[in-house]
Image (tube, grey):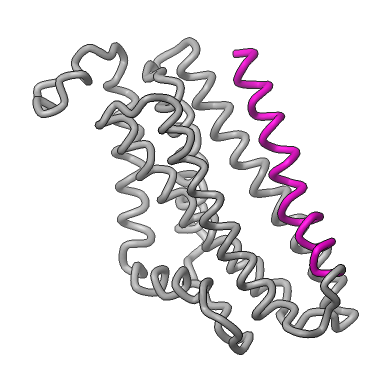
Amino acid sequence: MAFFSHFPFLEEIYGMDFFLLAVIVAVLVFVVTIGPDRQSYMESVASMFRGRSSDKEISYPSVSFISGIFVFLASCSSFGLLLCSIEGTFTLENGRGLIIFGVGTGFAALFYMLKLLLYSSVNGYLFNRQAITVKPSRWNGFFNMLFTVSGVLFLAVTLIITFFGLPRPYSLILACLVPVFVETGIFYRLKSVLFKNMISVMGFFFYLCALEFSPLALAIPVLMRVMCNI
């Protein structure tokens, strides 16, 4: 661990080699795939927190199918690495560290597919009934962009936790800030673009509960239960 002489605590952690290799690979994938479009990503994220606007402001960078696959895998892996850093388990060769990494990566992939299925079915139904003004495919593209941004932020949190040795409570708080940030942006986009004034307050609340709050409320206890049994 001579490369990390400024972080001596890393030298005392067994199994960091494969963990750091996985982190470096994830960073490189993000740099290569979204680096050229970083300006578009920044503009898309900034647009989430604007007030009322036209539906044209649901913008997201377009990526190729191959790049999308790599970004998806890197985003899912980032969550797995985050769980490893929070648990302080950096041995990915075998044992508990590898299991935690696999659980985190698989959980992120399943959560992504669940949300995409919900968006496609519910938004498609609402669009056909003219309850929303944005095509479901555009909102799915926006969600794909947010999933990628979440992966980048989770990876950044992983680096902070790992290299600065944050205690577990602070690590959990820092990790929770990512979904809070993303869901806040989604809330603004839903109200200012997707629905505008074409739905009642109660209908908007039901939509939030069904597609935003419920998946998180179900996913978090399941993840905690699985982690406790590892």
User: In the rendered view, would you say 224 is above or below 54?
Assistant: above
Q: Nearer the viewer, residue 93 or 6?
A: 6
- Relative image position of residue 76 (x, y in whole percent): 52, 42
Q: Nearer the viewer, residue 145 or 47?
A: 47
Left or right: 103 as drawn, with respect to 124: left
* Residue 223 is inside the magenta segment: yes
- Relative image position of residue 166 (x, y in whole percent): 33, 29
Left or right: 221 as drawn, with respect to 72: right
Name of the residue lying farthest toward the bottom: 54
User: In the rendered view, would you say 191 is above or below 88?
Assistant: below
Q: Residue at x 52, y 22 (%)?
A: 100
User: In the rendered view, would you say 208 is above or below 110?
Assistant: below
Q: Which secondary structure dominates the residues rendered in magenta? A: helix
Residue 201 image-quadrant placement: bottom right
Quadrant of image for the C terminus? top right
- Relative image position of residue 14 (x, y in whole percent): 29, 11
Answer whether residue 92 is visible to the viewer in this image.
no
Q: What's the magenta region?
A: 203-230
Q: Residue at x 40, y 19 (%)?
A: 88
